[in-house]
Image (cartoon, grey):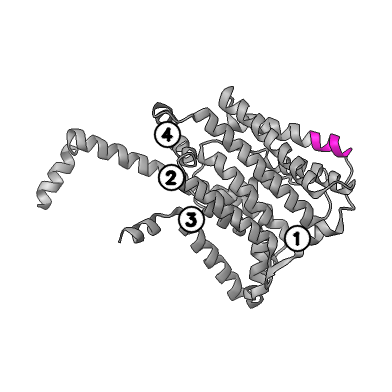
């Protein structure tokens, strides 16, 4: 019974049900969508958004936000790709990209956690700064002629039509989920987002936890950038532009509350599959993929409104229960209860 209650309370369960219902609806309209290859491609295509969603999930769980993650992806992808294009080793390219992502995350974490600047404002500034660095670094030109062996990695199949990229991403998500939910320090992120003042009182390093969250966000953005480079095969100065909205929407669809303290990385990864599948779904439904961003925005607004209303109702219910426990129910409720009995 306890297990069933836990499953029922799992916020990611609603996103999984939504994913199944969405795929089922599209399949009824166009049966070709339910072909195994088509369904697996929905998961294979989600690797970049999954990494972004999981990375920004750490930040959102602490009650903050990061709108610079798309630009960070672009810069990390540009740095890694130029090293590969110029004959550098894969290890050097990956390490350089990860270092850039961690540096951007550390910069964001310092400004928000130590200087106390609102995360939306600071990361919005970082977004402009990093996007400008991408243009300076690339000279406004595309980065092309990446090693064929590197780009072929995106098409390597592990089992059937499942790519090795998605298998690796899935393992990373599971590992990060275990760390977040099963380790003492991993639980700091949710605790800080749920009650920052209370977390500080019990000795949890709130500022350091938020900095680590931003560094992890930068690292996951770097991984996403490297995967993006291998999948696309070239990098433009606008790479990753607008991806931050899809990453945030994926987290919200996955059951992560924008106020922090609620949600899981599994839910974020499910939301990423939904967001990355919108373009494919539109094609199978006979619509233009130009509606992709419009639908993303609508989903984000609707889910945020629903989440806000639910949280407000829960807060009112909690305050009312607290008052009832101290002073008893209001007089009109007492009369009603007496009449009912």
Which residue is under mark 4? 195
Dot 1: few (<14), some (14–19), or many (≥20) neighbours within 10 Å? Answer: many
Horizontal side, residue 180 vs residue 226: left or right: left
Which residue is under mark 3? 12
Which residue is under mark 2? 309
- Could you tell me which residue is drawn at 77 percent across and 47 percent down? 91
Q: x%, y% of residue 45? A: 69, 60
Residue stretch rendered in magenta on the structure: 133-139
Q: x%, y% of residue 283? A: 70, 66
Which numbered tag is attached to residue 154?
A: 1
Report, in whole angstroms, how far the alpha carbon at label 4 lies from the one at label 2.
19 Å
In this view of the protein, which residue sits in the foreground, 248 or 301? Answer: 248
Instruction: Report the number of discs.
Output: 4
Q: In the structure shown, which secondary structural element does the residue marked by tag 1 occupy?
A: helix
Q: Are marks 1 and 2 in contact (CB under 8 Å)?
A: no
- Could you tell me which residue is drawn at 62 percent across and 26 percent down? 111
Question: Where, quadrant-wise, is the N terminus in this rendering?
Answer: bottom left
Q: Does residue 9 show up magenta in the picture?
A: no
Nearer-N-terminus badge (4/3): 3
In this view of the protein, which residue sits in the foreground, 47 or 32? Answer: 47
């Amino acid at each position: 019974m306890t297990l069933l209650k836990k499953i029922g309370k799992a916020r990611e369960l609603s996103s999984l049900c939504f994913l199944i219902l969405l795929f089922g609806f599209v399949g009824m309209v166009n049966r070709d969508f339910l072909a195994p290859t088509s369904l697996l491609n929905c998961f294979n295509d989600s690797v970049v958004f999954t990494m972004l969603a999981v990375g920004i999930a750490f930040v959102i769980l602490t009650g903050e936000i990061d709108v610079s993650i798309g630009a960070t992806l672009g810069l990390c992808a540009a740095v890694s790709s130029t090293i590969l294009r110029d004959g550098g080793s894969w290890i050097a390219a990956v390490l350089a990209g990860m270092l850039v992502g961690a540096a951007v995350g550390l910069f964001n974490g310092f400004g928000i956690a130590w200087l106390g600047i609102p995360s939306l404002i600071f990361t919005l500034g970082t977004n402009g700064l990093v996007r400008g660095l991408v243009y300076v670094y690339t000279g406004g030109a595309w980065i092309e002629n990446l090693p064929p062996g590197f780009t072929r990695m995106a098409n390597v199949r592990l089992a059937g039509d499942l790519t090795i990229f998605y298998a690796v991403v899935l393992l990373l998500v599971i590992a990060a989920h275990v760390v977040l939910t099963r380790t003492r320090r991993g639980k700091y992120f949710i605790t800080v987002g749920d009650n920052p003042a209370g977390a500080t009182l019990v000795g949890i390093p709130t500022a350091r936890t938020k900095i680590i969250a931003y560094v992890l966000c930068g690292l996951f953005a770097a991984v996403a950038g490297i995967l993006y480079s291998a999948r696309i095969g070239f990098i433009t100065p606008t790479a990753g532009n607008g991806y931050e909205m899809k990453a945030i929407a994926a987290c919200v669809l996955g059951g992560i509350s924008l106020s922090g303290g609620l949600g899981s990385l599994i839910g974020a990864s499910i939301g990423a599959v939904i967001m990355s599948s919108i373009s494919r779904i539109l094609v199978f439904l006979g619509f233009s993929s130009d509606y992709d961003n419009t639908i993303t925005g609508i989903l984000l607004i609707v889910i945020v409104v629903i989440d806000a209303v639910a949280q407000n109702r829960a807060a009112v219910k909690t305050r009312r229960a607290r008052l009832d426990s101290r002073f008893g129910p209001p007089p009109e409720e007492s009369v009603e209860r007496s009449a009912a009995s």
